[in-house]
Image (cartoon, rainbow, N blue to C red):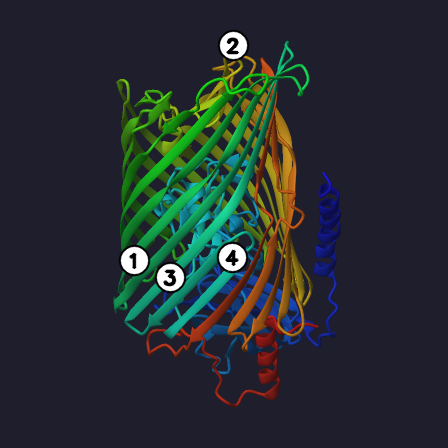
Amino acid sequence: MYLARPLGIIAICCIPYISVQAQTNTSAPSSNNQSVKGKITGKLVDAQKQPLSYTTVTLLREDSSVVNGDLSKEDGSFSISAGEGTYLLRISGIGIKTRTIPGVAITAAKPIYDLGIINEATSAKTLKAVEVVGERPLMQMNVDKKVFNVEKNITTAGGTASDVLQNVPSVSVDVDGNISLRGKDNPTVLIDGKPATLLGGDVATALQSLPASSVESVEVITNPSAKYDAQGMSGIINIITKRDNKFGFNGSVSAGAGTRDKYNGNLSLNLKNNKWNFFLNSNFKQNRNYNHHTQDRINVGSDTAFHTYEDNLHKFSGLFNTIGAEYTIDKHNTITLTENLNKMQWGGGGYANYQKYAGSLSDVLSRQYRTNDHSGGPFSTSTTLDYKHKFKKEKQELTASGTFAKTWVKRTQDYATSYYNESGVLERSPIYEYAPGSGDNTTFTGQTDFTTPFLTKTGKLDAGVKTQLYWFNSRNNPTLDSNGYTHIDSVLLSNYSYTQQIDAGYVNLSDQFGKWGYQAGLRLEYSNYSGSVNSTSHIDYTNSYLNLFPSAYLSYKMKEDQSFYLNYSRRINRPSFFQLIPFVDLSNPLDTNVGNPNLRPEFIHNIELSYNKQFKKGNSLMASVYYQYTQNLIERYKTFYSDGTTFTQPKNLSSGTTYGFELTGHVQMTRFWDATLNMNFFQNNILGTNIDPTLNNSGFSWFGKLNTNLRLPYGFSFQLNANYEAPKVAGQGRVQEVYWVDAALRKSLLKNKAAVVLNVSDIFNTRKYTTEYTYPMYTMTDYRDRETRIGNITFTYNFGHSESSPKGMGNGGRRKQSNGNAPEKDKDRQNLKTDENNDQGGF
């Protein structure tokens, strides 16, 4: 509760500031004659002459204050209204370098200034254009997704992809690394457009394994179109990793260390010419984290109580390697081969106390003391072959991709349990449990997509097919040793396998008519799942589904700086194999956990209305209202037994409903200080009367994120992230509030070729999760304390050089272009901009 008030104050202060900045210009007076109604037009294309759509084009006065702007259309064209005067034109977007074109003049004699074709945002018509190596905006709004450029987020240096995501608007990450989007669990998480689980293990493990230094941006797609997989309860989170596309030989190396034996390193290399692009990215990470878990239960109608305390140490080390080559056959054909090799090792151990009380907590009836030790980890590999063909017809292309991945896992879990009576005397010899296991997971994904102009000049048709195949096997051989007698533990014995196939085809049509734009699509998916369990008996499971998933988008551009977006989609959330596998977890003898192979998929209807407003001086505001209805809602459900123990299993509840309002604002308070605030307010309703007539839980919640950046003199910069999550409902309980603050300081060195970052996550050590459950037979409080206050220091050095791109290939390098005759004021402006973008501007 202590952070709620400061965040509220910040929100109140920031939002009016946007309004003030939108209406007030504190820069030097302009001599522009606003009586002349002029227009600046042009068309953006890439090196292959293909249109650059949804690219930000900003018109600036000569003092760098913002006048107006536009977002390039599907065909790459843009149009900006302006009065008489001389301006700068800044072009920025994903995958291109920010460029500034000076000398754009509107006069009474020439009210329309046409820049013509601007190749990779460099105009052949304006030879005096100067390329500025600048920063991409923190947030970019596209028709069907939001892009957050997290590369500059220094508070996560030395951390993982999970740390990156917890600072992304709309996204939450809990203490176990599980991801939610706008308060809803199970979004589809991709890494470079491919399932995150290709790293091995489940999504949470994959994200906690991927180093933050490998992440460039995060795409949040709350309502995916028919072109994307229908899988995912609350949308798609696509993590884009870094890949250098500059010509010549370039690279970077980084090394870091954190508190309590945490180490990380990264090596990135890139070699590119007009035909070949070779790339290598290698990461190493080693961690040790503590994890404390406390659980208190009080039985209803009796004076019996239970207290559990677990103290565990988790160890992790991993080596992640990506190596590949891209070959440009000719201007129409490109082929890319990428190989991933990842090796991870888990380990750790600890102890747990399970105590039963009568009356007061000092009256112990019995106690169990259990030690545990576990080790193992996966080795995974994936091979991807991508092909792209650009037809002679503009905006027409064919892409094909195939990925084969395999993961091998070995693990061991050992337990020793001792039982004591109320006097603290050992009742019997300790029981030893050994649970060695192994498994493998194989996947193949093949996809072909075709894009072509359709019907009108701005119309586009997308169509494609995709197949996904999964093979999974899990085996263990558990034994139980009691009083010197060893035998097979039939309770834990499991040999589980399953196969799953998903075939899909889609068609998507989009077009734009004046201020209106639309997109409509339909996806057909057939999924088939079959599995078998061999333990004390043999059981087979099978399910198959054929479903249609429509999607529709409508956009309206009120003015050059204001847009509305309305969209709808139907989605599916298939249970993961960790939810399906009927493996019995007895790590807590009071609460047995097991998967449910009879789970059915969830079906979700999403609708969203968004408004986007761009203000002067770089300020922006984005607001959304959304509604989501889920059938067959999957929740963990507890069953109670007369001896006080429980049995937890994921089950399908009747339905779930979520609706809410989201606000994201960016404020450029000064040239060297900016802030981004994201707030999400939502209502959750959970209905489970199909399995329990009394299960009807609902509640309101919200969360807020504040990110602020301050550029200081002498190459220093400071960043602070603050997060607050209000209490929220779960299936049978309520999660209490949690809040935390991260901070980082960065120093540029060696003429910006190197940097040192010092950061601390969860400065006040407040990121602790408490869940309260109210059941018919007892009440329970569950407290989780995972190590979150971590200090890191990271050093990064960039090396190599870039060359101008060869003729006909566009400008691929960090080239500063000038004909040598630019006025001195343009050279000065170039220096000013370069300093500003390299955190050297300061005060």
Q: Position of residue 311 (x, y in %)?
A: 54, 36
Q: Looking at the image, which is closer to me, 197 or 653?
A: 197
| Number of the front mark, 2 or 1 | 2
The alpha-carbon separation of the residues under discs 4 and 3 comes to: 16 Å
Q: Position of residue 57 (x, y in %)?
A: 54, 65
Q: Earlier in the sequence, mark 1 or mark 3?
A: 3
Q: Are marks 2 and 3 in contact (CB under 8 Å)?
A: no
Disc 4 packing (10 Å; few <14; some 14–19; many ≥20): many
Q: Which residue is identified by label 3?
A: 281
484 versus 350 height, above or below: above
The alpha-carbon separation of the residues under discs 1 and 3 comes to: 11 Å
Q: Which mark is residue 642?
A: 2
Residue 817 visible to an observer of this rendering = yes
376 versus 129 height, above or below: above
Q: Which mark is residue 158?
A: 4
Q: Which mark is residue 338?
A: 1
Disc 3 packing (10 Å; few <14; some 14–19; many ≥20): many
Q: Position of residue 632 (x, y in %)?
A: 44, 24
Q: Quadrant of residue 701?
A: top right
- The amino acid marked with disc number 2 is Ser
